[in-house]
Image (cartoon, rainbow, N blue to C red):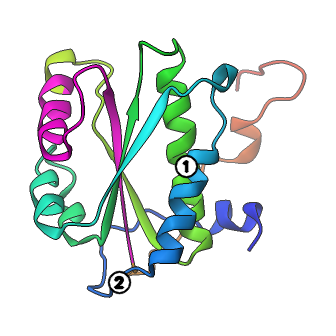
Amino acid sequence: MNVHEAIKNRREITSFSSREIDAEKLERVVDSGYMAPAGNNLPSREFVVITDQDILKKMSHATPFMGWLADSQAGIVVTGRPDVSKYWLQDASIASGFLWLASTEEDLGAAFGAIYHSEDESESEKRENHVRRLAGIPDDRRIVAVIGIGEADENPKPKDHLPFDEMVHYGKFKQS
């Protein structure tokens, strides 16, 4: 599968089978996040790979929207380092996308669990501290997301997109 096919085939999978992930597949997914670009090539994002089912179950309570994490076979916690780069959030977000696409290429399901909350600092702190305690993450790291990964137990249809010409502008922005 090439990257364009992975982009088109990517779905948010929130129902996972109980089959174990092949360790080599998981390692290739993790490597894709590691290889993602970062501003000025600074080490502004780090990853914690969780495969312990008890921890994943507890971590699924970080937000009301991550119950699916309890049934995934792995969770990759994506962290950012504001002390290293002012682009930590962008770098961690790019890496998250790479993890998701690599999961698709490996024929694994994935879902994005947003932990960092840009509009509500107290909610973000609550979510981040929940994950931080479970994964042993130092206080100087921000926790952007948890990517849940596993063998898909569903095959959802593609979501509808707004028309291409309403979203893509050439030369300059055109208002409809």
**Which quarter of the picture shows residue 131?**
top left
- Secondary structure type for disc 1: helix
Could you tell me residue 151's position as x and y percent? Answer: 40, 80
Q: Which residues are the magenta region?
A: 124-150
Residue matched to label 1? 33
Q: Secondary structure at mark 2?
A: loop
Question: Residue at left 43%, top 62%?
Answer: 12
| Residue 66 visible within the image | yes
Type of amino acid at the residue the image marks with label 2:
Asp
From the viewer's perspective, tell me whether residue 14 is left or right of residue 22: left
| Image: 119 above or below 10 | above
Q: Where is residue 31 shown, x and y percent of the image?
A: 57, 56
Left-right relation of 51 to 27: left
Instruction: First in sequence, mark 1 or 2: give its number.
Output: 1
Give the Cα distance between marks 1 and 2.
24 Å
Q: Nearer the viewer, residue 93 or 137?
A: 137
Question: In the picture shown, does residue 175 fall above or below 108?
Answer: above
Q: Looking at the image, can residue 159 be seen?
A: no
Q: Is residue 9 above or below residue 113?
A: below
Discs 1/2, front: 1
Q: Amino acid at mark 1?
A: Gly
Are the residues at dot 1 and dot 2 in contact (C-beta closer than 8 Å)? no
Q: Position of residue 152 (x, y in %)?
A: 40, 79
Q: Which mark is residue 153?
A: 2
Q: What crowding class fits label 1: few (fewer than 14 Cα within 10 Å), some (14-19), or many (20 or more)?
A: many
Q: Nearer the viewer, residue 111 or 54?
A: 54
In the rendered image, residue 69, in percent from the top left (x then y), is placed at: 24, 62
